[in-house]
Image: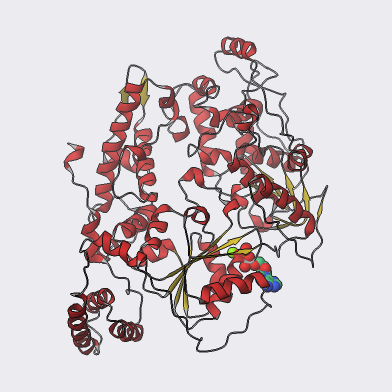
């Protein structure tokens, strides 16, 4: 089969399926008609006409269709006076460019706020009521969602609240009035998906897996160059990863820029890398076209139907749109928003952007709005935590201080914490082992299965069986992974490799299996990334923050992304925050935490030293209270570890706790 024989669907092919009013009641459609006909809004009238073709069961439909047709004729006559381009993209862009300020009206009923707005919240409200696009620059815990609630309560116009995470939306739904629809971007996309995709709900919501592709495409082990063998599972993973990157981008078509360079291929010769890239691209195009076909069993998945929505150039039928946590926005969603005619309000904390590696864009930095205001007072913590946060932000170039809540006391110092936050997943397991050792019941935030798969992958590679785990793409032996971790390209694996060598994968699996659900836990352990949006009374930070920063060696200061992550982690505490001395030294005095150093000679010796493995740092520490499996047989023990190297963005991000 020729993979590239299958045509790609073009964005304009989705134009016909636009149904921005799909979720509206008939009464709401009548209201939309009133407004659109008064404003001679040709575009909305056309969409309304299209929507009514799906509402044949309602008795009032024929009459409303007649009215719409009449208004459309009038609007068309008037529109002929203007020069309007017909290409959908241009129309969409011109829609955004020619955005008139929203005309806010009084709300039908007065809704009393639970709190007295601060001056900063009031300033945001006044800017909102002027009807122009608005950016609300907020700091951690400064009442972002409450401020949006305040805004929506003050207008009679209809709004759309958007957030990426379901949990943020569920939280917001309770706060907002009925004149605003609260949804994730995914649920808007889901509602708008053409009915053909909904015959079998799994077509939209199931996740296509590498295993499924192996079966459906009958993938076979393949060799690239003379030594790079790629397993069928890894091929499937390469296709899916390419599609994921494309789906999250604002690009219309899949291209070579979406194909990741994974594992062993990163150090392969250029011709091999090109060959793998073309292979990945061709396969991904084929798989995507099958996902797009309503009758093909390969599911679109959540990323897929969101992309489908983006490609259909949707119109969000509302007067204003609020985007919460806008600092980590999916580029597809941002592209959709920028094409809207509704008033746009972005709220977020630009310093809490921590998903850049995953292709997220910081709308708080990249989007220009007509107005912009600040929320700088935190309701979460008192002055001590606020002062530390201010010092962190100063390093990131922020001039405004974070102000603490005058009603709360907070302190920096030793604590028996409710939560422990670490930079890497490897350190979270360290914390788990220590907590088990102390007889505590730890909960580890996030999905453990990926880490488990990776540890199983280590076992396979040690047995000289190629692993199906994507992290070990193209490797045949564990020792190859260990060597790879020494290179710049493999730097993202250093922590993991050192950790496996130090503890042994069996003991790590044992510890992971002993963590409990959050309700049963007396301690929460999380990476900084997974702690986003959460808060605890007392928090301890582990000492692995800032350790993988390129600036360490060049003297240019740590990577801003690492500093942003530290800012996120330290602003999770409400009362007590325990910070390792090295990190305090950095925040207070600019002294960088030390990194593990590579000693070249020793490294070379290490390479020769063992055929099974070469890097082990310290004697194994085993929990005392219960009996974990025995660690690995003794292997060459060395006092140095592989150095932490610059973290490559986007690759195996979750290894770093993302
Ligand atoms: N003006 C205010 N006065 C007192 N408390 C407020 C005010 N604004 C917000 N809050 C409180 O601050 C807390 C955090 O607000 P929230 O909007 O959830 O913050 P964010 O969205 O930034 O995480 C909530 O308990 C909220 O009720
Ligand atoms: Mg919020």
Q: Position of residue 211 (x, y in %)?
A: 36, 40
Q: Please say if 499 is above or below 242.
A: above
Q: Position of residue 210 (x, y in %)?
A: 37, 40
Quadrant hosting ligand 2:
bottom right
Asked whether residue 525 appears in the rendered view, the answer is no
Q: Quadrant of residue 502?
A: top right
Image quadrant holding the C terminus, namely top right
Q: Quadrant of residue 42?
A: bottom left
Q: Nearer the viewer, residue 477 or 388?
A: 388
Q: Going 55% across and 80% down the picture, which residue do you hit?
A: 153
Q: Quadrant of residue 629?
A: top right
Q: Position of residue 310 (x, y in %)?
A: 34, 58
48 left or right, relative to 509: left
Image quadrant holding the N terminus, namely top left
523 left or right, relative to 63: right
42 left or right, relative to 545: left
Q: Nearer the viewer, residue 312 or 615?
A: 312
216 left or right, relative to 640: left
Q: Nearer the viewer, residue 471 or 583?
A: 583
Q: Position of residue 219 (x, y in %)?
A: 29, 34
Q: Going 71% across and 29% down the picture, which residue do you hit?
A: 594
Q: Nearer the viewer, residue 343 or 163?
A: 343
Q: Please say if 513 is above or below 524.
A: above
Say how many tags the image has.
0
Image colouring: secondary structure
Asked whether residue 295 appears in the rendered view, the answer is yes
């Amino acid at each position: 089969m020729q993979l590239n024989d299958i045509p790609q669907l073009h964005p304009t092919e989705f134009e016909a399926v636009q149904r921005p009013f799909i979720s509206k009641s008939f009464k709401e459609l009548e209201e939309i008609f009133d407004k659109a006909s008064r404003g001679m809004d040709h575009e909305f009238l056309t969409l309304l006409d299209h929507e009514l073709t799906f509402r044949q069961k309602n008795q009032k439909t024929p009459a409303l269709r007649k009215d719409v047709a009449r208004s459309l004729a009038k609007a068309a006559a008037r529109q002929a006076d203007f020069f309007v381009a017909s290409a959908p993209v241009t129309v969409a862009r011109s829609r955004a460019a020619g955005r008139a300020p929203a005309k806010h009206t009084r709300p039908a009923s007065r809704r009393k706020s639970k709190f007295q707005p601060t001056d900063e919240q009031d300033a945001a409200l006044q800017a909102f009521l002027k009807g122009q696009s608005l950016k609300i620059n907020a700091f951690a815990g400064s009442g972002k969602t409450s401020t949006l609630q305040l805004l929506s309560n003050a207008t009679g116009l209809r709004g759309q609240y958007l957030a990426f995470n379901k949990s943020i939306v569920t939280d917001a739904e309770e706060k907002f009035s009925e004149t605003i629809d609260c949804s994730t971007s995914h649920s808007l996309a889901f509602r708008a998906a053409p009915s053909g995709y909904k015959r079998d709900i799994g077509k939209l919501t199931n996740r296509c897996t590498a295993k499924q592709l192996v079966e459906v495409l009958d993938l076979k082990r393949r060799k690239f160059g003379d030594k790079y063998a790629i397993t069928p599972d890894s091929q499937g993973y390469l296709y899916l990863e390419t599609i994921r990157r494309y789906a999250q981008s604002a690009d219309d078509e899949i291209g070579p820029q979406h194909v990741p360079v994974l594992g062993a291929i990163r150090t392969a010769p250029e011709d091999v890398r090109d060959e793998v890239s073309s292979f990945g691209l061709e396969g991904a195009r084929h798989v995507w076209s099958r996902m797009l076909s309503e009758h093909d069993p390969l599911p679109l998945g959540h990323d897929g139907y969101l992309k489908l929505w983006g490609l259909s150039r949707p119109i969000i039928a509302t007067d204003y749109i609020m985007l919460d946590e806008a600092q980590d926005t999916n580029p597809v969603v941002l592209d959709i928003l920028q094409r809207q005619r509704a008033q746009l309000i972005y709220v977020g904390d630009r310093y809490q952007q921590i998903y850049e590696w995953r292709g997220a864009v910081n709308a708080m930095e990249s989007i220009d709005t007509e107005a912009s205001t600040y929320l700088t007072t935190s309701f979460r913590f008192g002055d001590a935590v606020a002062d530390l946060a201010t010092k962190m932000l100063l390093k990131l170039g922020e001039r405004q201080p974070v102000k603490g809540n005058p009603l709360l006391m907070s302190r920096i110092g030793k604590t028996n914490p409710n939560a422990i936050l670490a930079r890497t997943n490897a350190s979270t397991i360290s914390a788990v082992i220590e907590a088990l050792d102390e007889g505590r019941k730890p909960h580890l935030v996030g999905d453990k299965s990926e880490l488990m798969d990776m540890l199983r992958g280590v076992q396979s590679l040690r047995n000289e069986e190629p692993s199906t785990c994507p992290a070990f793409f193209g490797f045949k032996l564990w020792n190859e992974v260990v060597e790879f971790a020494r290179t710049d390209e493999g730097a993202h694996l250093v922590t993991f490799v050192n950790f496996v060598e130090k503890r042994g994968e069996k003991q790590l699996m044992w510890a992971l299996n002993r963590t409990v659900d959050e309700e049963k836990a007396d301690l929460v352990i999380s990476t900084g990334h997974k702690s986003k949006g959460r808060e605890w009374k007392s928090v301890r930070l582990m000492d692995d923050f800032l350790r993988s920063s390129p600036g360490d060696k060049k003297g240019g200061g740590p990577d801003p992304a690492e500093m942003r992550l530290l800012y996120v982690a330290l602003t999770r505490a409400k009362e007590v925050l325990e910070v390792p001395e090295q990190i305090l030294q950095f925040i207070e005095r600019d002294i960088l935490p030390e990194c593990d150093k590579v000693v070249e000679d020793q490294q070379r010796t290490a390479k020769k030293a063992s055929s099974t493995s070469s890097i082990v740092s310290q004697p194994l520490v085993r929990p005392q209270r219960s009996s974990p499996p025995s660690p690995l047989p003794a292997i060459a023990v060395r006092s140095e570890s592989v150095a932490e190297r610059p973290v490559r963005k986007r690759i195996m991000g979750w290894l770093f706790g993302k």
